[in-house]
Amino acid sequence: MKRKLIYLLSVMLLLSLTSYGAIKIKGENKQYQGEGLTIVTSFYPMYIASLNIADGIDGVQVVNLTENQTGCVHDYQLTTKDMRTLSGAQVVVLNGGEMEEFMEDVLDQQEGIQIIDSSAGMKFLTGSTHDHNHEENGDQQEDSHVHNHSNINGHVWLNVERYMKQIQTITDGLCKIDPLHEGMYRKNEETYLVKVQSLKGEFDSLKEITSGTEIIIFHDSFAYLAEELGMEVVHAVNTDGETALSAGEIAEVVEEIKLHDIAYLFTEEQYEHTIAERIEAETNATVYVMDSLVTGGLDKDSYLKGMKKNIEILKEAFAVKNK
Ligand SMILES: [Zn+2]
Ligand SMILES: [Zn+2]
């Protein structure tokens, strides 16, 4: 009972995090006066969230940057089309958490643009969670297991609870910038939050099975899915960048899987599977192809559909393993 109360309080704390500083105004405040508002989003999950919040509001359009990206946005470079889109924006919606490094310089030079940082005030996970030792092994072995990555992991939208907070922050921002349509933004927010909340319910019942499971992930984004499911990320293989893994790094991952007796490897559609499959062949672990929602369909229910698919994959994976 007490545990439940503490859990409830921590959820409330997370949801009530102040959105102070979520809106940055650069230059002259071009507050919407009813003549049409263009909201530009930095990349896919921000686009889908904003589409839902601005749904059916006359004169308000949502346009996405980074449209032709095929994976995550880490190595993205703005195109001339992106630049044109940006110059027509009154509002820019960002994910935050250092995900938008590709447009920082350009945003610095934009005048009269209002920026909503959807993860303002949020505490991020850091790059790697692998900081444990294997005590049964010798000193040398222990040392080789302490990694220190301090980079911020910005893929917060993959934790449903955090995504809900982002929806609220974006809505708060739009209501301040465009108070004429506050009622409609709020109504849309509520509708969307109810749908996302039902995903949360499914994740919570999955968590009863997945909690405590050790996994290896092939994109930092899944650390947030793991957080949602109470899973422990033993190793995050970085396949985000352009550099391929060395044979030594692959051997290290294989060793890690054997030491921890890991059964689950999470990779994703947008990336090459060859490394994960090679590791799968050398161990008892199974590769599961999940969706990070960095790309996808353009209809407003795409996040819900993508997450639903992730839930189905997880259900199947854990039903098989528990037989
Ligand atoms: Zn990424
Ligand atoms: Zn280890």
Image (spheres, grey):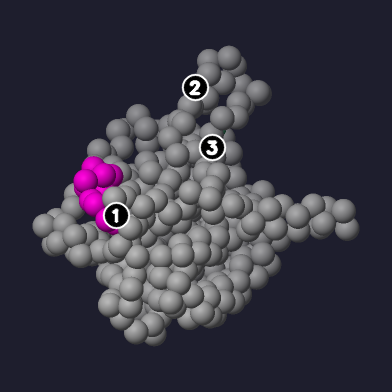
Residue ID for mark 3: 129
Please give the label number shown on residue 310.
none
Q: CA distance from mark 1 to mark 2?
A: 53 Å
Amino acid identity at mark 3: Thr
| Residue furthest top in the image | 139
Q: Position of residue 197 (x, y in %)?
A: 60, 71
Amino acid identity at mark 2: Ser
Residue ID for mark 2: 144
Residue ID for mark 1: 28
For residue 277, say whether it is visible. no
**Residue at screen point 30% across, 62% down:** 30
Q: Is residue 104 magenta?
A: yes
| Quarter of the picture holding the C terminus | bottom right
Q: Quadrant of residue 322?
A: bottom right
**Residue at screen point 33% across, 78% down:** 34
Q: Position of residue 226 (x, y in %)?
A: 56, 52
Please tell me whether the stretch drawn in magenta is mainly helix, strand or loop.
Answer: helix
Q: Secondary structure at mark 2?
A: loop
Q: Of discs 1 and 2, which sits in the foreground?
A: 1
Q: Is residue 101 left or right of residue 258?
A: left
The boundaries of the magenta stretch are 103-113
Amino acid identity at mark 1: Glu
